[in-house]
Image (cartoon, rainbow, N blue to C red):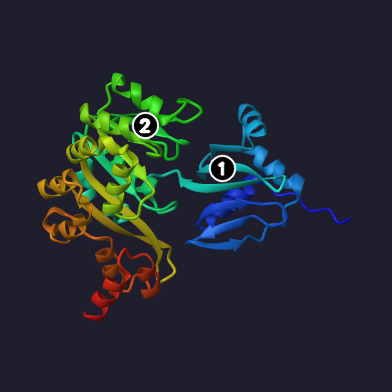
């Protein structure tokens, strides 16, 4: 029987970074698979055997992580290859074999300007208190946007920043800010538990990796009410859906109270999605930006989130923009193709009318 050649872990990770991959997938019976510019590509490495796959995945873990994985058959952690990149990793079992999905986290944290992100993000990052939500589907660049906003704070303000992450992704070095990064499983048991105590640690800024349950939402809102600037993520596609998602998470008998609390605490919602560039140079982001003006706070308080769309449309002077407006600009500028832009729209019919009328 022909011997399948082993793959060197370091060579593999260097190659996926060198080829501009955003993700690496490890699966028995396939060569390592890369995601490049949003598309899946099979690498030129040999097909992975059962033992070869196990060796690669276990080679990413320390002894404590191996024990946890063997017990739970699922593990989230970060692996760092010095001088190359960090890799947010999920190891799992599939059909009795070990597998893994790895997201590439660059060592260098780019700024808002280097990424070409909306300049209003600098103003949002300059706020002193309240709740800022960064939303979008998995893999849309939410962590990258928050990291860029933290870099702006780090070079502009003297603040104490505490991040609660699952796991720690971008590693920040102290500049003007003091930044403490705490990882789920290593430093904290849950986001909600950590948020219960975080205000005793004298933070100016708290970053919550994901508001994934009701208790975490409650604690994040409370931290913002107590004077911190709280940045958190949600898997929602636009501002109105985000507000509805939060309000609908609470029991109906708390509806009036939570609408009031959210209307006071919320400062901004940044919704984003990634699209392939027409020139093949990678991907670009489209953004929806909601700034909580008195009018926005009023419709949230009254439970009329559907009116948020029209308020964003008329709020450009505050730095607001609809996701569909951003997609339209990217298409008309020749940066993305029509089909990709249309597929990401909140209102495809209105988008089609808007583009055909220009």
Q: Which numbered disc covers residue 60?
A: none
Residue at the spot 60% in from the left edge and 52% down from the top edge: 25
Q: How many marks?
A: 2
Q: Secondary structure at mark 1?
A: strand
Q: Quadrant of residue 297?
A: top left
Q: Could you tell me residue 20's position as x and y percent?
A: 50, 57
Viewer-closest of 139 and 215: 215
In the structure shown, which secondary structural element does the residue marked by tag 2 occupy? Answer: helix
What residue does disc 1 label?
90
Judge left or right: residue 85 versus residue 213. right
At 27% from the left edge and 33% from the top edge, which residue is drawn?
221
Label 1 vs 2, first from the N-terminus:
1
Q: Is residue 256 above or below residue 144?
A: above
CA distance for labels 1 and 2: 24 Å
- Position of residue 47 in the picture relative to residue 174 (left or right): right
The residue that label 2 is drawn on is 215
Front one among 50 and 254: 254
Residue 333, visible in the rendered structure: no
Above or below, 14 against 351 in this view is: above
Give left or right: position of 244 versus 33.
left
């Amino acid at each position: 029987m022909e011997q399948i050649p082993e793959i060197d872990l370091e060579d593999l990770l260097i190659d996926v970074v060198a080829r501009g991959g955003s993700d690496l997938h490890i699966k028995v019976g396939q060569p390592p698979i890369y995601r490049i510019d949003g598309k899946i590509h099979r690498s030129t490495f040999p097909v992975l055997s059962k033992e070869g796959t196990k060796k690669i995945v276990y080679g990413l873990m320390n002894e404590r992580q191996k024990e946890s994985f063997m017990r739970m058959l699922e593990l989230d952690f970060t692996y760092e290859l010095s001088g190359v990149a960090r890799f947010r990793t999920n190891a799992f079992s599939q059909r009795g074999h070990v597998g893994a999905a790895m997201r590439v986290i660059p060592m260098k944290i780019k700024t808002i300007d280097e990424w070409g992100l909306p300049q209003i993000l600098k103003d949002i990052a300059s706020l002193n208190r309240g709740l800022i939500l960064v939303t979008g589907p998995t893999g849309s660049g939410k962590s990258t946007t928050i990291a860029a906003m933290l870099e702006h704070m780090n070079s502009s303000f003297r603040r104490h920043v505490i991040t609660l992450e699952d796991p720690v992704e971008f590693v920040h070095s102290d500049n003007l800010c003091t930044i403490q990064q705490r990882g789920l499983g290593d430093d904290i048991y849950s986001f909600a538990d950590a948020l219960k105590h975080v205000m005793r640690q004298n933070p100016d800024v708290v970053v919550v990796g994901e508001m994934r349950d009701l208790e975490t939402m409650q604690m994040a809102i409370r931290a913002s009410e107590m004077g911190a600037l709280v940045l958190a993520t949600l898997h929602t596609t636009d501002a109105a859906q985000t507000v509805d998602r939060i309000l609908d998470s609470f029991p109906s008998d708390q509806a009036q109270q939570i609408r009031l609390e959210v209307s006071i605490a919320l400062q901004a919602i940044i919704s984003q999605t990634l699209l392939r560039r027409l020139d093949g140079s990678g991907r670009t982001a489209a953004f929806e930006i909601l700034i909580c003006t008195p009018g926005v706070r009023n419709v949230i308080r009254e439970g009329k989130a559907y009116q948020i769309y029209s308020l964003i449309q008329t709020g450009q002077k505050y730095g607001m923009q609809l996701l569909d407006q951003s997609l339209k600009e990217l298409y008309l500028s020749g940066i993305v193709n029509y089909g990709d832009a249309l597929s990401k729209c909140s209102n495809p019919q209105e988008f089609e009318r808007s583009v055909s009328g220009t």
